[in-house]
Image (cartoon, helix red, strand yellow):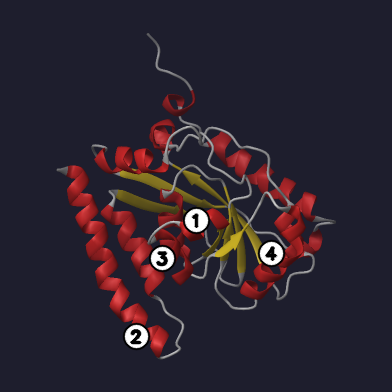
Amino acid sequence: MRYWARIGALLTSLLLCLIPHLVWRVLRRPSPWPRHFLALAARSVGTRISVVGQPHDGDIFILANHVSWIDILALGGTTGAAFVAHDGIARWPLIGWMAAQNRTIFVARDRRAMLTGQIDALRGAMLGHQPVALFPEGTTSDGRGLLPFKPALLAVLLPPPRAVMIQPVHIDYGAATSEIAWHGDEPAGGNAKRLLQRKGRIDVTLRFLEPFDPASCADRKVIAALARERIAASISLHQHPSASSPPPV
């Protein structure tokens, strides 16, 4: 019952936002409806979002840790960001089309020969004022630590196509982190079903950390290292015992 109720709420959120979004598109106006849909979708799956820190009020390039597909609903609904995503998602039925409506930049991370074109596409996306969000780990982690950051696409920030600040964001599911995390060996459908059936709400805190200017960094590796250092420090500071180790017997 819980699963089908949340599926129903998701579909209702989509219908509420889709028609006005298409009208905005016909009128060739920037549509606010993808952001509204992501915010409604987050609530539909039982997520409650808290924001700590101050999102930068100018153009921002967000670098965040990646724990779950819920990250996209929470971060996108809060900031209105367009995401950088693996090009395989573009071929997912419905999901790929919906991602494209939010101006998702699809990249092939495993094909270095295409890197220049991908950076050009990302640079073009940044010419607008929509925030851009990247998960530099390249995949989801267990949320208790960080995988190495992949700095290749950060070349777009040297120099950026317009004045922009980089803002690291720590996505924190608190004591439920290990339960929420999407592990690599879990099928996408199975993970979605597991979370949609889950009892209780999903509390997520978006911790907006101190932004920095990419112009102050020597190269993309320095950008990646500085963002990773700030997110790692926040993870360490807000580590929950039940998220990092099993309870005592």
Q: What residue sits 42% from the left and 79% below the top?
A: 31
Image-quadrant location for residue 38: bottom left
| Residue 55 position in % (x across, y down) | 53, 62
Question: Which residue was labeled with disc 3?
Answer: 98
Question: Which residue was labeled with disc 2?
Answer: 23
Question: Which residue was labeled with disc 1?
Answer: 89
Q: Amino acid at mark 2?
A: Val
Mark 1 near mark 2, Cβ–Cβ under 8 Å?
A: no
Helix, strand or loop at label 2? It is: helix
Mark 2 and mark 4: span between their CA atoms? 30 Å
Q: How many numbered marks does the figure carry?
A: 4
Q: Amino acid at mark 3?
A: Met
| Residue 180 position in % (x across, y down) | 40, 37
Q: Does residue 76 sit above or below 4 in this rendering?
A: below
* Residue furthest out toward the bottom: 27
Mark 2 and mark 3: span between their CA atoms? 15 Å
